[in-house]
Image: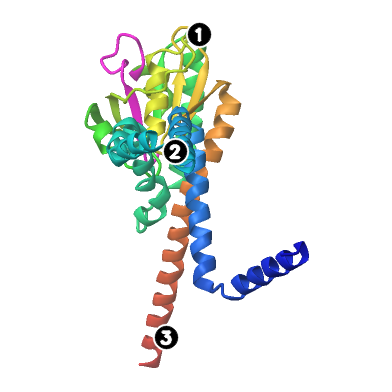
Amino acid sequence: MKITDWFADFFSGMLQTIRSITIIDIIDIFFVAVILYYAFRFVRERRAGKLAVGIIFFAAFLIFSDFLGMHAMTYIFQNLFQVGVIALIVLFQPEMRSALEKVGGSSLKGLKTVGESRDSSAWMLAIREVSAAASQMAAEKTGALIVFERGTRLGEIAATGTICDAQISAYLLRNIFFNKAPLHDGAVLLRDGRIYAGGCLLPLTHQSDLNRDLGTRHRAAIGLSENSDAVVVVVSEETGIISLAVDGHLSRGYNADTLRSRLTELIEPLSKAGEGRKIFRFIRKGKATQAHTEGSDGE
């Protein structure tokens, strides 16, 4: 067969395949691409990436041995892969749990917050007071751990502490984290712009490549941010450095202004969503009142 004939057959087959593509096929390809993209990003940003590389290597070796007719090696690897699903569940258990919790939390937070109202003024007050308190505690080298609850409800975290449900203020936060106070060793959980609970225990991160200078507070902050969409503020007792944990990543070196700005970026979308629902309800209520008035005038 000539090269030109081969190319003609190839392009003819390609055109025929393209013509047979339907809308369902396009949607199917799109969803598969999205799943593969998020799976790649999830594995790449965690220690599971090294395990994934090892699995890909063994899979490639299985294909290679089967291609060369190495029956003994193919038999061994095929039997290993038959029980490999259970091994993957055991090896990737922390990462799989984190992914499932986020799918059921931050990915669906729009559905979970339908009908809930979030007062933007309360959140803005919370951000301002937390930033001021963190700056003051950093100057005094008072350790602190403050959790902003977002889409994922943290009831099991609140249950490990003491329910407060108090109006937030910088003075109250400083009092809670005073080193002689009963709740100073735990975390403060903020819900809907209020201090919901204090003295809470947070799960520690499983990351093994963290800076050894990071203490238990920082590891707890990273651990909670890995398993939820919470934003966690940390003040180091040793150095006075203010840090922020979001999505399993820790950023450091904040002051009162930069912390307030960053928290506003992370928290404000929630308060705006709540305000949008309030405005919608207000407009709907106004229309209902207007209709009632017009009906009364007609009578």
Q: Position of residue 201 (x, y in %)?
A: 28, 24
Q: Amino acid at mark 1?
A: Thr
Looking at marks 1 and 2 on the same chain, the residue that comes earlier in the sequence is marked by: 2
Q: Nearer the viewer, residue 171 or 138?
A: 138
Q: Position of residue 226 (x, y in %)?
A: 40, 32
Q: Residue furthest right?
A: 4
Tell me the chief SS of the magenta region.
loop
What is the number of the mark on residue 294? 3
Q: Quadrant of residue 190?
A: top left
CA–CA distance in space, label 1 to label 2: 47 Å
Q: Quadrant of residue 298?
A: bottom left
In the image, residue 20 lies in the stretch drawn in magenta: no
Left or right, 239 with respect to 109, comes to right
Q: Which residues are magenta?
A: 176-194
Q: What residue is shown with label 1?
A: 239
CA–CA distance in space, label 1 to label 3: 67 Å
Q: Nearer the viewer, residue 28 or 11?
A: 11
Seen in the picture, residue 235 relative to 16 is either above or below; the reply is above
Q: Residue furthest bottom?
A: 299
Left or right, 176 with respect to 274, comes to left
Q: What residue is shown with label 2?
A: 59
Check disc 3 and report its element: helix, strand or loop.
Answer: helix
Other residues around mark 2 within 10 Å, as few (<14) / some (14–19) / many (≥20): some
